Every structure is written in structure tokens, then in C-alpha cells.
Image (cartoon, rainbow, N blue to C red):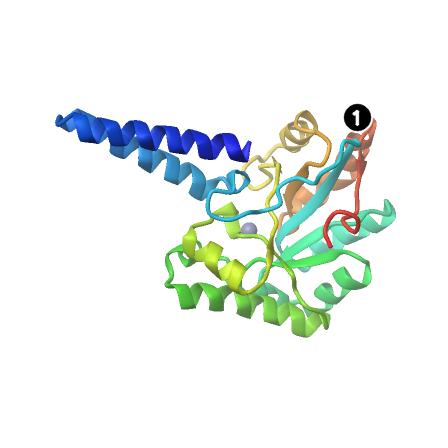
């Protein structure tokens, strides 16, 4: 997938260059520029393509196992509900916490750790404009968020999920400079978009494949509400929900 995509970029860029070198029409120029811009924007918004940064978006296994991740918490009621559901089902997940929210909810951060889940950073403020900050501010935004979690949890934060899956060369540099492991996803539940529980459930169930990482949000009521049924439905398809230990060191 990765190699094919890079090959495709190379092919299209070569094609665009030939167009530019041999043709002199405005149309040739517009076609070339729009191909390049389209490819860059696909790469910016699709973390699975690994265009700027290598992220783990699925885990290597042929077994029917999928993995849960929860972003944008901790939230006072929903994260607790989700932790209770996970505990009742003896399941583990990764929680990607926003630093500013973690600061407000230190007890929930501690509970995530005490319940045996992994915790990752998700920037200090989760603002979309951070992608346009200069290099130093991007590093700060990521590092300060992680530092709050580290202080509360009493352990290093090694995992990071770029908000909205947006990556660019500066975000990639920051993640490498801070020695973080970037975690993406391969099933986007769209729980932030769909208002209908069945749609969220069906979307996830239809995309189940070995090793896939499911993106959910513990900041949302709907996600806390559907989780018990979603777990039952995933299992009814012959899939188990894995813990990360043997896959992410
Ligand atoms: Zn997020």
C-alpha cells in the first residue's frame, strides 16, 4: 500500500514534469499543479498513507483481532462509562488524551493507567491551527500536552496521535524529535459525525479485518452509549478485541 502510493506519486509527478517541460499551455500547467496539490492534500489528511510520517495504523496479525482507541478525553462522565464497560468485558485500549483536559481530570488519567490501559498524547489544546504553527510551537504543543499526562501518570508518554490524523513535514519532524510513536487508525467510526448509533455500529462492523485499529472518541455520549453493544457485535463476527502489549512495545 505504502510502496504503491509512493510509486503513484512518483509516476504522477514525472507525468506532470513532462507536461510542464514539453507543453506550454495554461491547461497543462493547471493539470500538473492540481495533480500535485491533490496528492499533497490526500497525504495531509490521510494518516494511513504515511506520506510525511510513518504511523502505525494497523497491527500485524492474521488472527481475527481488532483494537480499540479513544481520543479527545478525558471527559468526566463518558471516559468513566467507557472504562467501566472495558473493565466489565476485560478489555484494554489506548486513550489519546488532550493535555489541557488531562490537567482538569487527573483522577481519570490515573484510572486509565490503573485499569491497565495505554495512554498517549493528543496535543495540549487540540486546535486545528496547530498544523500551521512554526516548528518550535508545534513541538511545544505536543510536548506540553504529553508532559501533563506524564506528571499525572508518573510514566513516560511514548505514543502520540496527531489530531484529525493531520500530518505535515513539521508535525512529522516534531514527533521524531520527541521520539514518539505515531498511532493512526484503519477504521474511522465517524462517531463525531453520525448521530445514529446503528450507523456507527454498522460502519465499524463492515470494516472489520485482522489487525485493524478502531478510532472512537471518549469525549462523546454516543460512543459511551454504544460501546457495550458494539463489543457484543464485534465478537459476534468472530473477532476478539486485542490488547496492545504484544504488538506495541
Ligand atoms: Zn482528536
Along the line of sight, the residue nearer the viewer: 221 or 239? 239
In the picture, the quarter occupied by the N terminus is top right
Q: Is residue 127 visible?
A: no
Dot 1 alpha-carbon crowd within 10 angstroms: few under 14, some 14 to 19, many 20 or more: few
Q: Residue at x 47, y 65 (%)?
A: 139
Depicted 80 relative to depicted 149: above or below: above
- Residue 147 % position (x, y): 60, 71
- Residue 50 % position (x, y): 52, 42
Horizontal side of 106 relative to 166 (left or right) equals right
Horizontal side of 65 relative to 159 (left or right) equals right
Give the total number of marks visible in the rendering.
1
Tell me the residue that label 1 is attached to.
237
Along the line of sight, the residue nearer the viewer: 135 or 87? 135
Q: Residue at x 58, y 65 (%)?
A: 99
Mark 1: secondary structure: loop
Along the line of sight, the residue nearer the viewer: 198 or 40? 40
Q: Residue at x 52, y 64 (%)?
A: 177
- Residue 86 % position (x, y): 80, 48
> Is the residue at mark 1 in contact range of ligand 1, meaning its CB lies under 8 Å from it?
no
Along the line of sight, the residue nearer the viewer: 156 or 196? 156
Residue 118, quarter of the rendered image: bottom right
Depicted 203 relative to depicted 56: above or below: above
Q: Residue at x 49, y 39 (%)?
A: 46
Residue 110, quarter of the rendered image: bottom right
Depicted 145 relative to depicted 163: above or below: below
- Residue 29 % position (x, y): 19, 31
Q: Is residue 169 visible?
A: yes
In the picture, the quarter occupied by the C terminus is bottom right
Amino acid at each position: 500500500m505504502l510502496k504503491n502510493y509512493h510509486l503513484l506519486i512518483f509516476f504522477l509527478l514525472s507525468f506532470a514534469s513532462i507536461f510542464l517541460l514539453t507543453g506550454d499551455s495554461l491547461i497543462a500547467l493547471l493539470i500538473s499543479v492540481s495533480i500535485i496539490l491533490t496528492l499533497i492534500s490526500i497525504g495531509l489528511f490521510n494518516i494511513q498513507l504515511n506520506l510525511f510520517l510513518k504511523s502505525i495504523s494497523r497491527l500485524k496479525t492474521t488472527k481475527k483481532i481488532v483494537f480499540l482507541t479513544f481520543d479527545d478525553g478525558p471527559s468526566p462522565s463518558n471516559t468513566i462509562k467507557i472504562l467501566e464497560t472495558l473493565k466489565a468485558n476485560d478489555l484494554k485500549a489506548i486513550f489519546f488524551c488532550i493535555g489541557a483536559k488531562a490537567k482538569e481530570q487527573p483522577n481519570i488519567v490515573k484510572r486509565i493507567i490503573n485499569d491497565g490501559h495505554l495512554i498517549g498524547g493528543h496535543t495540549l489544546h487540540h486546535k486545528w491551527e496547530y498544523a500551521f504553527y512554526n516548528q518550535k510551537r508545534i513541538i511545544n504543543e505536543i510536548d506540553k500536552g504529553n508532559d501533563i499526562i506524564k506528571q499525572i501518570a508518573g510514566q513516560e508518554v511514548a505514543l502520540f496521535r496527531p489530531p484529525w490524523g493531520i500530518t505535515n513535514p513539521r508535525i512529522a519532524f516534531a514527533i521524531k524529535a520527541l521520539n514518539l510513536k505515531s498511532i493512526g487508525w484503519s477504521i474511522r467510526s465517524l462517531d463525531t459525525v453520525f448521530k445514529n448509533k446503528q450507523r456507527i455500529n454498522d460502519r465499524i462492523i463492515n470494516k472489520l479485518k485482522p489487525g485493524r485499529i478502531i478510532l472512537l472518541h471518549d469525549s462523546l455520549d454516543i460512543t459511551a452509549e454504544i460501546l457495550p453493544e458494539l463489543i457484543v457485535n464485534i465478537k459476534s463476527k468472530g473477532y476478539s478485541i486485542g490488547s496492545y502489549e504484544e504488538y506495541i512495545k
